Amino acid sequence: MSSQQSHPLSHIRVLDLSRVLAGPWASQTLADLGASVIKIEHPGAGDDTRAWGPPFLTQDDGSRTNESGYYLICNRGKRSVTVNLKSPRGQALIRKMAREADVVLENFKVGTLDRLGLGYEQLSKENPRLVYCSITGFGQTGPRAQQPAYDFMIQAMSGLMSITGESDDRPGGGPMKIGVPMVDLITGLYASNAILAALARREVTGQGDHIDMAMLDVGVTLLANQAMNYLLTDVVPPRRGNRHPNIQPQRVYPCRDGHIIMAVGSDAQFAKLCRVLGHPEMAQDERFQTNAGRVVNLAILDPWLDEQVIKHDKADLLAALDREGVPCAPINNIGEALREPQVVHREMQFSAPHPDGMDMPQIRSPFRFRNSSLRLEDGPPTLGQHTDEVLGELGLSAEEIAELRADQTL
């Protein structure tokens, strides 16, 4: 079996018309799994995220490239082709590529690609097997369908910010967004899941599909247990900071020399925690014997835990809890997380080559297979790096490509 054949999606071709994060995260996921991904970018400017810095990748001599960290984290493994979608000749090129593609991925405003002759209805007529995934803020239908959206907006509108952050009665209380654009990222993962499901269905029916992926839908889905808490009680969940609404004890705890987290998920684990703290009798207290009792009596349990935990140094307490099998962890910053021995062992950080000869740092996708591998050897492309190569594969001559470039189609 060749290296290429060992990639799970080595047989899949993706035409990626998306930009910024949710769409590129989806297509990078497919690229890591081995799909051939052609990234279409506007001539001269490219994906908006190329300019979203600092920081930017720097050359060995210290000079700045045109690739921001934001762009570099979500465009690995793709080939960049510049095409002016407003040009009739550019539109013809996209239609030609779509005839050979398994997947088209886009995140334009609703109706934009239809007006350019590049919507699902038009492209699927020439390629009925095409899986066409549209990512938008609010979906293809509804009162907000025409409105643009960013992750921050969706975190606010979906309710995620209402349950993120410290409670109003504590210092720093108030709604807070998550520290990464989580809705964008999870939308990308849902989109790649939906694409794979549509491809699997196509194997049975021979027919493609149009996927309507909305960021607001994803944000509401991510409410998960908090949404169900509301549906079961009709009580709006409050912000609790690091305190879990259903499982206790579980939050940040102060030690003598800093903070740790504990995530006690069972009555047996709570009994072990009490032994480590030197008070096994607390696990027999009828108020705290069960998780339900600990949740109800948290106002009593919390200050007692703080009094006990602060007597310990972080490293010593974490080691003791680990020995007993009580879930706990240090609160790492990003540098510490990347140096965490388990993360190093799993090779989550690696380097990919840049066309100019330097190495680009990357964070690995978490997929692991026994009988296949990921394709991680190709870094994010420079703008238009593969235009001539891809158009040559479509059958265009060097003279035709030069003509397209001269009339600003490329």
Image (cartoon, rainbow, N blue to C red):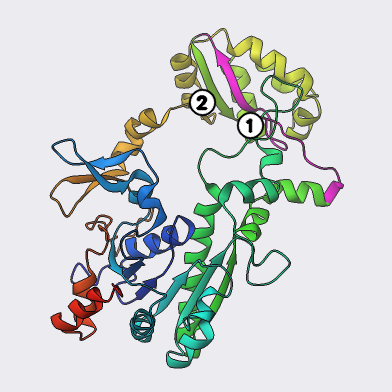
Work out which residue is located at the far bottom of the displayed protein and give it.
125
Residue 181 versus residue 401 in the image, above or below:
above
- The overriding secondary structure of the stretch rendered in magenta is loop
Q: Residue at x 22, y 63 (%)?
A: 385
- Residue 131 placed where, x, y %? 47, 79
Magenta highlight on residue 76 = no
- Residue 46 placed where, x, y %? 35, 60
Q: Which mark is residue 324?
A: 2
Residue 328 versus residue 31 in the image, above or below:
above
- Residue 38 placed where, x, y %? 32, 70
- Residue 396 placed where, x, y %? 20, 84
Q: Residue at x 55, y 74 (%)?
A: 211
Q: Residue at x 48, y 10 (%)?
A: 257
Dot 1: few (<14), some (14–19), or many (≥20) neighbours within 10 Å?
A: some
- Tell me which numbered mark, 2 or 1, is placed earlier along the sequence: 1
Dot 2: few (<14), some (14–19), or many (≥20) neighbours within 10 Å?
A: some
Magenta highlight on residue 238 = yes
Which is nearer the eye, 244 or 214? Answer: 214
Residue 68 found in image quarter? top left
- Count of numbered tags: 2
Residue interval drawn in magenta: 232-256
Please indicate whether residue 238 sits to the left or right of residue 360 in the image: right
Residue at numbered disc 1: 268
Please indicate whether residue 353 sits to the left or right of residue 214 in the image: left
